[in-house]
Amino acid sequence: MFFPLWYLTRMRTKSPFGPKLRAARVKRQFSQSELGRRSGVDRRYIIDYEFGRNEPTYRNLRKLVDVLGKTLSDELWR
């Protein structure tokens, strides 16, 4: 089957990070807006991370981890 190049470049696999981020946020009882306000990461980025549309930069990942009380080496991020 033939797929045009533009179609293949839009196909992405969802990141396992998104559901883990959402689970940690819900466990702490934060809304996306609250997590964004506390971490300094825009709520729209958090939504994109949770839906697997984008991966966080190292700086944003550090901010989120600090607010959620985790470390980068925790099982949550593996």
Image (cartoon, rainbow, N blue to C red):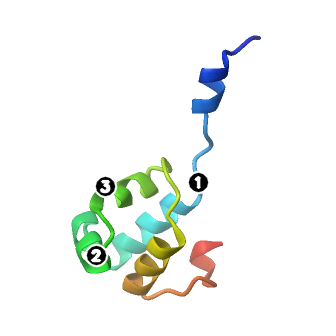
**Cβ atoms under marks 3 and 1 closer than 8 Å:** no
Pick whichever of labels 3 and 1 is earlier in the sequence. Answer: 1
> Which numbered disc, 2 or 1, marks the residue closer to the eye?
1
Provide the residue designation for mark 3: 44
Vertical relation: 14 (above or below) 69: above
First in sequence, mark 3 or 2: give its number: 2
Residue at 23%, 74% in the rendered image: 37
Q: Position of residue 70 (x, y in %)?
A: 49, 86
Label 1: element kind = loop
Mark 2 crowdedness (10 Å alpha carbons): few <14, some 14-19, many ≥20: few
Which label belongs to residue 29?
2
- Mark nearest the camera among 3 and 2 is 3
Q: Amino acid at mark 3?
A: Arg
Q: Secondary structure at mark 3?
A: helix
> x and y percent of residue 25 in the render?
37, 72
* Position in image of residue 77 (x %, y %): 59, 73
Disc number lying in front (3 or 1): 3
Q: Quadrant of residue 32?
A: bottom left
In the image, residue 47 sits, relative to residue 34, either above or below, namely above
Mark 1 Cα-neighbour bin, 10 Å: few <14, some 14–19, many ≥20: some
**Residue with the mark numbered 1:** 15
Horizontal and vertical percent position of residue 60: 44, 72
- Report the residue at 25% width, 67% height from top: 31
Which of the two labelled residues, at mark 2 and mark 1, occupies the earlier sequence position?
1
63 vs 77, left or right, is: left
